[in-house]
Amino acid sequence: MRLVLQLVARLLLIVALCLGAATVWATFDAYRSVDRATAASAQRVAQALQALYWHELLLRSSRAREHLLPVPEWRTLNTMKLISPGVCVEFQPAAAFEKPLCGQSEGLGKTPPRWFASIVPTFLGSHAEVVRPVSPRAAAAGTVVATPDATAAISLAWDYILNVIDVALLMAAAIALLASLAIAHTLAPARTIVTALQRMARGHYRTKLPRFRSMELAMIGGAVGELGTRLEEATEQRAALTRRLIEIRDDERRALARELHDEFGQNLAAILAFANTIETASAKEKSDNVIAQDARMISQATHHLMASLRDALKRLRNPLPEELGLEASLVNLVDSWRSQSAARPTIQLDLRGDLTDISGPTATTAYRVAQECLTNALRHSSAREISLRVERRAGEDDALLIRVEDDGGGDAERVAQSAGFGLTGIRERVAAAGGSLSILPARGGLSVAATIPLAA
């Protein structure tokens, strides 16, 4: 899962938890706000009646104090203004048949669902009535009793919750959207870093990253750049060491070729001369046909050994690209295999792109790869058709592709894990040139492909 989506999902979870907490708090606050409104209503009405009480006491001193209230009539419009909606107030001692004076509760809030009306009182409890004395200094003045309407309280709480949830949902959506955009913008440089790492994986170690504003991303970018520098240095050192080892090995091969030519070649020529002499002498003397026949067999074996020696010397000496160029040497290589036996499989050569300016170690490496792959396909498989394709890929990634495919079967995984001298040699040469080698199954056989960068 992408990091942006993970962060956005976690953000939405946090917003949902905050929204739930806000809903619980809004429910508690709205439900208990009725208690506060009840206490405030009782206090206001008590203060108003206290003023009325002392006013009547001063004007009508001849009347008994217990008859001062609620006369004159306290149930006035001014008193109604002091009572909050959903709260009922009564004066005690109450007169006969006197009903409480209630604030307006019709249309107060929206009708809550049944589950809400049953759950809220269960968890938050019921509302208590509030009693306030009219005058703390005169107990005979009576008391004011304010009682909240439970139904009105629940309606107010539900209406308040709906308003809070609407606002909270809008804020949550806005926060989620803006935070998602901010997170996506902050993590956008990660794509640049990944692209740089992918280029490094393809061998382009000097990949410059832009300067990031975030300190963490800037540290990652610096680490990636330092890693690329060290990888390039290590690759150059490894390539130089491999090239030096290949040069030493080529020198050893040339020295071995000289030794084989000078020692084995001369000895084989001498053996052949002695065998011809024996055969000629036996033929002239007509003494023993067995000796002449043995001399001919020695001559045939010597010819076979000399042919094998010539093939070995061809492979040990410097390749033809140094003399003929890559294209001509590949043509000569394929023609030499074709001319050795008509029973050999068909070899198709496909050259693409401009190969004329490819020379030096790159041409030598390409020739050696093609030579070794053709040798393996001819000697170690029952292929009927072999394809050698050499293509120059122009553009930003200027590289040379050498691919040899055959239909002779074989296990690609086993061949890839082989530690034979031939494959080990071409792996070393391709690695020294900064390229890559792959061995994969093909249609009916194997496909060996080497990519050699020309800029290396």
Image: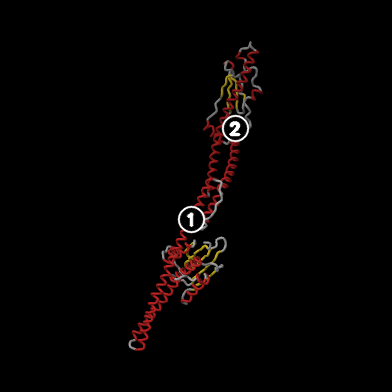
Up-down: is 136 above or below 280? above
Three-letter amino acid code of the residue under disc 1: Leu
What secondary structure is found at the residue carrying circle 2? helix
Q: Residue furthest top?
A: 62
Q: Which residue is mark 2?
A: 156
Q: Nearer the viewer, mark 1 or mark 2?
A: 1
Up-down: is 415 above or below 136? below
376 lies left or right of 135: left
Q: Earlier in the sequence, mark 1 or mark 2?
A: 2
Report, in whole angstroms, how far the alpha carbon at label 1 lies from the one at label 2. Answer: 70 Å
- Residue nearest the viewer, comparing 132 with 9: 9
- Say which mark, if any, is on residue 411: none
Q: Residue furthest left?
A: 287
Q: Position of residue 333 (x, y in %)?
A: 49, 72
Q: Is residue 412 visible?
A: yes
Are there few (<14), some (14-19), or many (20+) residues within 10 Å of tag 2? many
The answer to whether mark 1 and mark 2 are in CB contact below 8 A is: no
Q: Position of residue 219 (x, y in %)?
A: 51, 47
Q: Position of residue 45 (x, y in %)?
A: 61, 22
Up-down: is 423 above or below 135? below
Q: Residue furthest right?
A: 77
- Say which mark, if any, is on residue 231: 1
271 lies left or right of 444: left
Query: Which quadrant would residue 57 be assigned to in this image?
Result: top right
- Residue nearest the viewer, comparing 405 with 375: 375
Three-letter amino acid code of the residue under disc 2: Leu
Q: Position of residue 41 (x, y in %)?
A: 60, 25
Are there few (<14), some (14-19), or many (20+) residues within 10 Å of tag 1? some
- Residue nearest the viewer, comparing 2 with 293: 293
Query: Which quadrant would residue 382 be assigned to in this image?
Result: bottom left
What secondary structure is found at the residue carrying circle 1? helix
